[in-house]
Image (cartoon, rainbow, N blue to C red):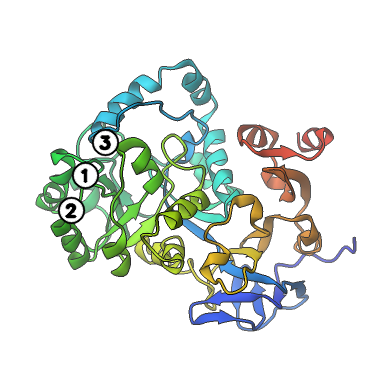
Amino acid sequence: MTHRVATAHATLKGGIAMLPTGASREPLYVRDGSIASTPGPGVFAVDLRGHRIFPALVNAHDHLAVNAVPPLRQGAPFANSYAWIDAFQRHFEEPAVVEALAIPKAQRMRHGALKNLLAGVTCVAHHDPWHPALDAADFPVALLRDHGWSYTLDGPDFGPPVRESYAGTPPDRPWIIHLAEGTDAVAAAELQRLASLGCLGANTVLVHGVGLTDADVARVIACGAAVVWCPGSNRALLGRTLDPRRLATAGRLAMGSDSRVSGARDLLDELRDAAASGDLPMDALLGLVTADAARILRLDRRGGLAFGAVADLVIVEDREGFAAGSLVGRRRAELRAVVRDGRPCIADPDFAGWFDAAGVDTIAVRLDGRPKLLARSLAEPALVAMEPGLAFEWPQHEAACS
């Protein structure tokens, strides 16, 4: 391997970049962690013939600290969120759950972030109280910050009071709450209750929204609010999910994974399942985890590959004739490379030269049976051990990371 002076500058050539204006075969320049109009000094060329370059994904809803907690076992679907919250309180007393929650929260937070990164997600809206671990300079993903939130209208006091939190959130920042998470009259009445509190505005982001009526959806669209769709979690807990079409057409819908306690393994799995349902075309689904999510969450430099955007990328082999379909429908091991701030984080072994040029030390791992190179800063043995499907390529690598 030829060693170079580490550089965050790269020219991605030969691939198809999914720009805001459409697909482009022009080189994509990465400079100082951003998408640039010209190459930087000491640039490293990456040959991406036969590949597509997408913006990395934005997960609009996750509970990072509980992705290693065994999922709730249940029979009949719950009528609303308050019923399943009660069930979860009992679930948290089970020995396997107690054992999982005994892992320090900082470690569980990092694991939840690593889960996202492996699936091409580089920015997450974490819907729980802030934790000092999230401020670590080497945290695996970027996070939504300076936003307001509450947990639910009723139920356990997991978050800030609804009215006070909304009033204290600047109008140019999103305010997030679980709402209408159910199929009964309780869920159906929640949007009006929220509006009566004065908390329904253009920066309101409702998570789940399964119980929204047609009139509610129209009201959400009219006031410029938005909904985060978590179809896997909804089907697991409630037996059904919302109809995403009107909200998506209006640009008022994003997608989240919720967490493995109730949802799919990761955001890619959510996308694949949503594509199989046929409710939305693939390009619309891709928007829910890129441009639409970034706009709804007020993430100005994310969700696209325009000049000045953060150089967070997902690189996949091109499925000829399929644009969004080159990414939507993929599983995480099929991603050729995940790039954050212009530097690869996990990629197939033939990207070793890019890691080397960017000054990123790596370690060999297997992800769902496929060989990968993982940035050594992410290869904490405790985290690797927590993630099903991720393992060091050779046992001595674990010792090397210790």
- Rate crowding at label 1 as few (under 14), some (14 to 19) or many (20 or more) other CA atoms within 10 Å: many
Depth check, mark 2 against mark 3: the one in front is 3
Residue drawn at the location 66% of the way across and 32% of the way down: 385
Marks 1/2: CA distance? 8 Å
The x, y position of residue 306, in whole percent, is 52, 77
Marks 2/3: CA distance? 20 Å
User: Do tag 1 and tag 3 residues touch (Cβ < 8 Å)?
Assistant: no
Kind of residue indicated by mark 2: Cys
Q: Earlier in the sequence, mark 1 or mark 3?
A: 3
Residue drawn at the location 41% of the way across and 28% of the way down: 72
Horizontal arrangement in the rendering, residue 62 relative to residue 344 (left or right): left
Q: Earlier in the sequence, mark 1 or mark 2?
A: 1
Q: On residue 199, which mark appears?
A: 2
The x, y position of residue 3, in whole percent, is 88, 63
Residue drawn at the location 67% of the way across and 59% of the way down: 337
Q: Is residue 242 above or below residue 182?
A: below
Kind of residue indicated by mark 1: Val
Q: Judge by depth and name the residue closer to the eye, 89 or 18.
A: 18
Q: Judge by depth and name the residue closer to the eye, 360 or 193.
A: 193
Q: Is residue 156 above or below residue 55?
A: above
Question: Which residue is situated farthest in the right direction here?
Answer: 1
User: Do tag 1 and tag 2 residues touch (Cβ < 8 Å)?
Assistant: yes
Q: Earlier in the sequence, mark 2 or mark 3?
A: 3
Depth check, mark 1 against mark 3: the one in front is 3
Find numbered disc 3 in the image and state the secondary structure of the residue it sits on: helix
Residue 171 can be seen in this image? no
Task: Please give the residue where the numbered disc 1 appears in the rendered image.
Answer: 162
Q: Judge by depth and name the residue closer to the eye, 225 or 14.
A: 14
Kind of residue indicated by mark 3: Ser
Task: Please give the residue where the numbered disc 3 appears in the rendered image.
Answer: 81
